[in-house]
Amino acid sequence: MPEEKKKAELKISGMHCASCALNVERALRGQDDVYDAQVNLAAETATVEYDPAKTSLADLEQAVNEAGFGVVHDEVTVRVGGMVCVSCAGVIESSLAGLDGVYEARVNLATETVEITYNSAIVTISEIRAAIVAAGFQYLGLAGEVPEDVEARMHEEDLRDKFRRLTVGLAVSIPLFFYMIAGAPGATALPVSINLIMLIITAPVFVYVSSPIFRAAATALRNRALTMDVMYAMGIGVAYGASLLGTFEIVLTPAFNFYDTAVMLAAFLTLGRYLEARAKGRTSDAIKSLIGLRPKTATVLREGREVEVPIEDVVVGDILLIKPGEKVPVDGMVVGGESSVDESMITGEAIPVDKREDDEVVGGTLNVNGVLRVRAEKIGRDMVLSQIIRLVRDAQGSKPPVQRIADVAVSYFIPVVLTIATVAFLVWYLVLDAPLLFALTVLISVLVVACPCALGLATPTAVTVGIGRGAEFGVLIRNGEALEISERLTTVIFDKTGTLTRGRPDVTDVITFGMPEDRVLAIAAAVEKNSEHPLGAAVVRRAESAGISVPETERFMSFGGRGVSAVVEDEEVLIGNQPFIEEHGTTVPEEAEDRIAALQDEGKTAVLVAASGGLAGILAVADTLKPTTKAAIADLKRMGLAVTMITGDNERTANAIAREVGIEDVHAGVLPQDKAREVRNLQAKGEVVAFVGDGINDAPALAQADVGIAIGSGTDVAIESGDIVLIRDDLTDAVAAIELSRKVMTRIKQNLFWAFAYNSALIPLAAGVLHPAFGITFRPELAALAMALSSVTVVSLSLLLKTYTPPAKRGQAGVGRGELADLA
């Protein structure tokens, strides 16, 4: 193949027949500088020969997309060591983006990971590792493959190394600093120059403390990148270099003695990174706690014996024995035994859930009191816990749009600071005729005080902590964009059935006419026990929940959805609507008709019960509200949000429910496929819309909404169903999700403000703008300390989110309970 040609293999999705393959080939061959394209329908791949100088993989992918098909990408998250600032992130992203086959690389500075979208047929993990190492950073392995204890050990060793360096640096520089401040007493009596003595004292310390900074700067320059390490190396290098020249009186005089300053600068820079690394380590505590929920071993029943095996050796179909106090190893189905299982670490619900045969259990939850035999159904990455970990990790690595402000600022930051430092030096020395010593001090101060790290950490640290905090409450926020949009919401739309209501009919009222309530329920349940109608099931549930004994029946008959009849203890019983009862000779008194009309006005269905030719009672059946519905709607209104209800029910039922919960805007008679259109209509009016639904029937509306909030039912939750996924079937969690989003976005804005304000105030101060009028200067040592504190301040503000509890969750049982909540 000629040198200008390159071959790439693309995995294609959406092909169903030979004509699809021809369409893909035609689309690829239609691209300029594509020499050939061959599609293998069986393997669902396209092999393309193209000129890489003129056509990129992105161009090829766009051609496939425009033809109506898709290109399947591989995704991997890599842990990277040695990143200390936003510029480092830029170096890694550009190095990886330069690899053929890498579509996108996104660095999360807070979690020290890189999310890479790539084509595994073109580029391998080995090549990715080589690119990271060549850029001067450490490849620590794929996320999830590095054991937590190894990862923690590596982090602790890095902290210890930084601490040793800064301790040595400060131990030497602080006494020298005060000695020089005091005017170097006794220096004139020394047989050699004080500069030479300070050189001998500081040289090994300076090399030890500053070597990581110079190594990182050299790597960055080799990669033709300007990072903060380059600026810091320039600052401390100028200070130490000027001292060397002054000591040996080469160009400069002995007055240029910055030895103590140079060591102190390096020590303070290291201190900043030490504090930052410690704080950043805490931002991902939620993920670590989630991973810590996974047990390392399981007890498997094999050939009648209990065998303890590593969790990795459990296969689907294994029968597991789970004793009291043990964690459930994998997702499965109970096949024997009864127990209560604490699911608070997953759902946030404090009350243990009773489990018996045919109930599902979730890996990571805690068996409380009984012995369970469980058949393994989902293992490894298919488990609910693994999905939650993956979602939280991906979300923490995402960037909300507000991050673009910081990204743009950072891209210009270092060149601008270098320009300011150079201009300040030249203006002071050449224009204002200041001493060279003063001009150099200004140069050094500007170089070390500037800090884009605070800008770079402002968003990812808040997003990481905020999304982790949400997971503790059973609120899974899928990406940073959902956070930002949730802050700007104007309208929240609720589906009615299964979201505002329980999604099943229940008996709400029992009205009797001359017969005791228990007897009415007993005979009604006896008849309805033979029926498969949902209203009948509601009657049976009501009787059973009241502990009423249900008698036997005979001669059961059903009348086509209008009613049913049977003989109960030698008494004929009719159950149905009013026309059905009257057709069979039972008179409905006027008082009963008034009660029926009132119930229907409340959106309830009136089920009449007749016995021995007379009306015995009326059972009101309705889809009842969830316990937290009213409070959730009231909270949303207090937050200034408009609330709308969409339902397929008739207007009378819809309006009755809406009146009960306090919703004024009701759209009734809307088919499931038309719910997305209602969302679009509101968006066309300029509304920013959240849709709250069950994640299954409401999928089109959830996708159309600016933020789709999918409400789950405990551990049985569709993780992929919305932008925000609520594990619990609790509407206050929807309110909490919006409150948390607002809090995180407020914290991001505060972080960005302080980061911009810090640099805007201190860079001019370091450049000496206040010196002519007020005689104020900024010593390099203080500049370095201020730089260190700026990043720590931003990270610490983000960490405060770990203690935040949304107002909707305050006072609820279960909040702050469970393993995840220990983080707060």
Image: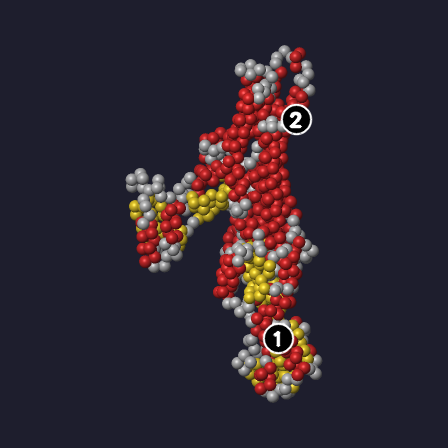
Q: Secondary structure at mark 2?
A: helix
Q: Vertical placement of 519 versus 92: above or below?
A: below
The quarter in which the N terminus is drawn is top left
What residue is pinned by disc 1? 600
Question: Is residue 671 rendered to the left or right of residue 201?
Answer: left
- Foreground residue among 586 and 494: 494
Q: Evaluate whether residue 303 shows in this view.
A: no
Q: 182 above or below 534?
A: above
Q: Residue at x 54, y 82 (%)?
A: 559
Residue 344, x across and y down, in percent: 63, 56
Residue 601 visible from this viewpoint: yes
Number of the label disc, if any, that sits on residue 774: 2
Q: Amino acid at mark 2?
A: Phe
Q: Amino acid at mark 1?
A: Gln
Residue 637: which quarter of the image? bottom right
| Residue 580 in the image: above or below residue 461 | below
